[in-house]
Amino acid sequence: MDPIHFSEEHRMLRDQIRRFVEQEVQPVADQWELDGMVPRDVLRQMGDLGFLGIRAPERFGGSEMETMGTAILSEELGRSTFAGFAITVLVHTDMASPHMLNFGNEAQLAKYLPGMIKGEIITAIAVTEPDAGSDVAGMRTRAVRDGDHYVLNGTKMFITNGVHADVLFVAAKTDPDVKGSRGVSMFIVERDAPGFSVGQTLDKMGWRSSDTAELVFDNCRIPAENLLGEENKGFYSIMRNFQNERLTIGAMAMGEAQKAIEITLDYVRERKAFGATLYDKQTIRQRLAMLAAKVEAGRQLVYHTAWLDDQGHDCVKEVSMIKAYCGELVNEVMYTCLQFHGGFGFIKESVIERMTRDARVQSIGGGATEVMLEEIAKRFDA
């Protein structure tokens, strides 16, 4: 049953994305896992269908939808069973490009946004460093003004789309004398910027069809006009989009979890043991039923929080709950679903094996569960 917050436009969007995934992704994405990336023509096709500009203004070619559109896109891409494909798209649409949407000036928007919406320009967000993830205050990458340019020095780590992105939104310290997270600025860095390079392509446990990189800025010179927003105000951009990023990951996780339960139901209804199907075993039916109830609760929390955000309410607590709850739940679901697949679930050719590997990072990336629980605890009396 559709949530009460869904409009006909939401249903049409969901159905269109689901058809695309079934026709254009699932039959061929095994090769993407081997290649370590999603082909550019697929991303451009998604741009042509309007999937990459759901929240972008109409005047730049977007659909100008609300947060609920993001939740629908994220959940449906999660259902693809290829989380590496899903995160490639979602980093571009909802983790990187919002920095341009939120803080780009008119010249920057005109230069970059139409191409981002069409899938001609793919983006990445570079905040995380070897010693600084959610702890933005620990950032060491520096940017120093030098005439009409800024010079960047530092290293970024675990950057999704980092290998093949055309444009990166990079966080760097512009005022090292202030304490904590103050003095951080955001910059637009193009792939061919002098002094920028991919240090290494990271070989991951999961999300194999997503390219992930260590990025190196060695006296990287970028025009001063590539400052995104105000100097020393980048922390606010990062914090603002953390909420969107975490809701996106939660919705994606619930799409993965729901699909895993469906796949497992199909399997246990066919697999026979001791003279009956596995589904005839009460313990299996009941464990899957409980997981289905938990996933539905997670989905409703995602939809409700998207609605709150659309209404302009502060929902940091709810978003933190989504990231903590959904990130842990998708791993619980995958563990049980693989268990019910038995030995076949441990074989590389099984879908559930790949989904289990992919899910592990959901409780880490975008804010680890432990960080999220602290955010919730801070707001117990709010």
Image: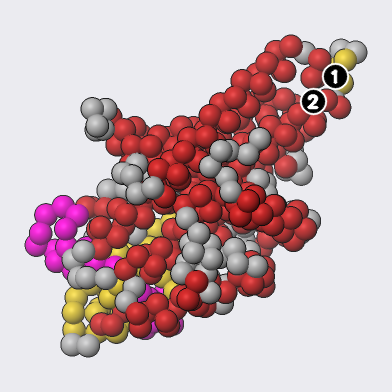
Q: Residue furthest left?
A: 177
In the drawing, what numbered circle is on residue 277? 1
Q: Residue at x 38, y 69 (%)?
A: 100
Residue 80 placed where, x, y %? 67, 49
Most foreground residue, 123 or 68:
68
Q: Secondary structure at mark 2?
A: helix
Q: Using the image, determine if residue 163 lies above or below residue 252.
A: below
Q: Secondary structure at mark 1?
A: strand
Q: Residue at x 63, y 51 (%)?
A: 8
Residue nearest the observer in this picture, 80 or 68: 68
In magenta stretch: residue 195: yes
Q: In the image, what residue occupies the spot 45% across and 44% down?
A: 307
| Amino acid on which disc 2 is placed | Val
Of residues 166 and 120, the one nearer the viewer is 120
Q: Residues within 10 Å of mark 2 (few under 14, many from 20)?
A: many
Q: Do tag 1 and tag 2 residues touch (Cβ < 8 Å)?
A: yes
Q: Earlier in the sequence, mark 1 or mark 2?
A: 2
Which residue appears farthest toward the bottom when viewing the image?
148
Q: Which residues are magenta?
A: 173-200
Q: Where does the image place residue 81, in percent across and percent down from the top left?
A: 67, 46
Q: Amino acid at mark 1?
A: Thr
Q: Is residue 12 within the magenta segment? A: no
Residue to which mark 2 is pinned? 268
255 left or right of 121? right
Where is residue 274? Give x, y as percent.
Answer: 87, 12
